[in-house]
Image (spheres, coloured by chain):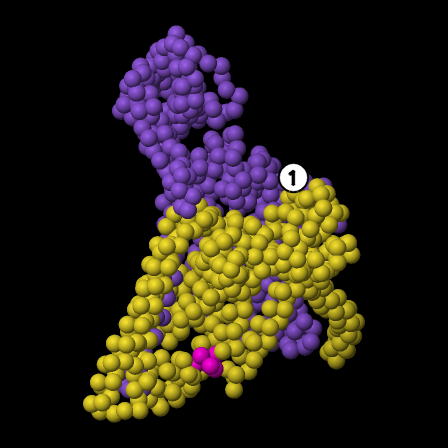
Chain colours: A yellow, B purple
Amino acid sequence: MSSGLAASFLISRSAGRRKRLAGLLGHAALFLTASSSALAILFIFYYIFRDALPFFRQRGLREFLFSTAWYPSSPEPAFGALAIFYGSGLVTAGAVLFAVPLGVSAAICLSDTLPFRARQMVKPVIEILAAIPSVAFGFLALVVLAPHLQQHGGTMLAVVAGVLGLPVAALGTWVASDLCTTRWTGRTRQVLRGVAVLVLGAIALLALYHGVSFLKALQIASGTNALNVALVLGIMALPTIVSVSEDALQAVGRELREGAYALGATRAETMLFVVIPAARSGIAAAIILGIMRAIGETMVVWMASGNAAQIPTPWYNLLQPVRTLTATIAGDMGEADHVTGSARYHVLFAMALCLVVISYTLNLVSEHFVRRGGRVGRR
Amino acid sequence: MNLASRKLINRVFTSVGVLSILLMAATLVVIMGPIVERGLGAFIFRGTVEHRRVLLQQFGRGDREALEAESREVAAARRPVYDLLEAFEAQLTQGPAELRRQYRQPLNELKQHLQGLLGPFPGKPEPVLLRDRYGETRWDQARARCDHIVYAEHYDYSDPSRMGLLVRTPRAEQFAGTVLEPLFTYVPAHLEEMLRPRWTCYARFLTDVSYDSHFFGGIGPELLGTFYLTIGAILFAVPLGVVSAIYLTEYARPGSRVVALLRTCISTLAGVPSIVFGLFGLAFFINTLRVSPSKSVLAGSLTLGLLILPLVIRAAEEAIRSVPETYKLAALSLGATRWRTMVTVLLPAALPGILTGIVISMGRAAGETAPIIFTAAVSVGQPLALWQTFTEPTPALPWNIFNLCSEHQAVDEIRHVQYGMVFTLVLLVLLLNSTAIFLRARISRKLRG
């Protein structure tokens, strides 16, 4: 019996060596497969850079970054992409301005206000919104939103401004009158407060009226403009912002909330002064992910931005057509493809390189925020 | 600040949150409304006799005798229109040259609209373009065309400070006092008899090829192309992704620098803009590796596969991690190796979760446009056979939606096809996603129970 054991031992030793070798090989194969995504990133950087390099060799950096003259197909071509960078920035900023307040307040409501059942009903809405393909959004922006904006854009803007502005003005008046009369007490305060409400309310209403009538008189020359794209990009960035910042808000422990409630804070005060500051890294990460979604989006901007390589006048005018990096790559490649090797072809790779670098940087920043947020949550 | 203000702010804060969620839901309704309503219109609509004629002559479907009988009745109803036109032209040729000059342009315009409504005039040679050989196939379009016959439209730019104003004048005024005048009351009154609209369910829209750049027929090649591209992307991304996830969850030392680097790479890959994937696919798969001479389904699938790789990795990782630790420990304690534990215990347990991830990535791959612009998509093409996918480009739903609504020469006339495509694509993606949601619900029920 003991010899049998020894034999089995011997066999298992040589088999063990083979097994270890096989295990090592298997491990190596697994590692190689797992590093395919790293390889992919490396290759993307390399191949985009390789095809971008000839452009920078031929034309240099200065024209590309600081000139607004974009005439790639003229006999004396000019490749100033400043206006295109600006267009990308403008629509992204517009989308963020629209999506962040909406998304963060929706996330707050989802994480702290709504009961579980209602949350389960809202989740699919966000998922569907996230799942709709970008080309469908682009189609709607071009076919539905653009004609409406062009025909009654001024009225639409005025209505939105009125509906949003009236409650804000009322609340602002109420709170401001309360805040600026805290020095007095009793009867004097009530009288002063009444006066303050009247004065501030009148000012606010007047301002609102002027704003609304200004918007109403606006004539929108083309429905395919930066505003249209910013709106639609904002809708597309919403699901990301909502779900990531909801996760961040949930990660803030119950203890902080209960502590704030125990001190007598209302829910709004708890959220604004305790939970949101604690979750700010996660919310920042959410915003950055939203920005990445908006800046890398191609189809919507290609279809509905108007594709005019110009800086709007004045610079914040969202009602003029713009052109973005992604749309330029998508739109010009078809024509540039036949003359592979020309500056016109390589400039598109230069733009892609800029996009990759931007998204890489943003990704690093968001990872940094996520890591910091994770630390705060654990502490 | 007094308590009343604090309470007010609190209440406003809550209602802002609820309102923003309601706004989000309303946005979804506003988005889905036109897609569903007008998208269904591509499948279910009031088809005219011309639609049935297209189906019979181009696709060989339908009842020939019934159509012939119907055509005779329709021709009888149309006869007065042609008679009026002939009488008017005879009047013109006999009348003074000035009269001819006055009516040449309005008459040509009118004849164009009549041809668009009813098809080519009897006795005229058959037009070259297929779209000119048939009248309006859809009742809604026929009515719009009828409106163009009754009213002439032009834009008034006399006030330079405003945008052009649409002016509609009845054509009956243009032709007042001529023999043609009764035509403008006859056509709207007898439109139904001339075109015979009938509720039609055109389900073969999904599988039919299209004729004359989508004027007639369906979206078969596009749907097939999207199908090929999606399956190709999955075939490429799933093995890579699942194996990567296995390595990351079970083999790599957690917290080591290599793993951190890999994770950064995966999240970077997930953040690369989709158009850059397209450029990379062109520069790498087509220009460098030469997987195909030019655009092909294969190159597009590889590009899309790369795009969804991070999604698959993350989903598979999460699924493997959510398998209870006890399963693994039990298998290991029975003497199974790590690999055996993985293949026989962990992967089967994680399979539903992995499937969920795969289905969601399929939805993503089906809807992406930017990566296939330079690598796989063409505007017009026939359905491909399986072996052709290695070398041939294909039409695909997302690309053709773009192409039809922004580069087609008659955008307005094929609006229904565009909506039909958008509807089909969105439905496809949502079906995939709801399958995923369903799968996930089952898993969570199983894990709880």
Identify which residue is drawn at 40% across, 36% down.
B155
Q: Write the start and end of the magenta stretch as one range.
A: A275-279
Q: Is residue B278 above or below residue A253?
A: above
Which residue is pictured at 64% across the width and 44% down the height? A334
Which residue is painted at 30% across and 69% down in the image?
A205
Residue B310 visible in the shown view = no
Closer to the camera, A254 or A146? A146
Residue B64: horizontal and vertical position, in percent? Answer: 40, 19
Q: Main secondary structure of the magenta part?
A: helix
Element carrying mark 1: loop
Q: Position of residue A139 (x, y in %)?
A: 47, 48
> Where does residue B133 sit, x and y in percent of width and height?
46, 22
The picture quadrant where one finds residue A372 is: bottom right
Q: Chain of mark 1?
A: B
Question: What amino acid is at disc 1?
Answer: Glu
Q: Dot 1: within a 10 Å radius of its alpha carbon, few (fewer than 14), some, or many (20 or more) residues?
A: many
Is residue A157 in view from this perspective? yes
What percent of the width, then of the height, locates residue B121? 42, 17
Q: Does the stretch in magenta take in B415?
A: no
Q: Residue furthest left?
A: A187
Q: Which residue is mark 1?
A: B392
Q: Is residue B209 left or right of residue A8?
A: left
Q: Who is closer to the viewer here, A312 or B303? A: A312
Q: The N terminus of chain B is located in which quarter?
A: bottom left
**Quadrant in the picture for residue A189:** bottom left
Left or right, residue B428 beside residue A308: left
Q: Is residue A376 above or below residue A242?
A: below
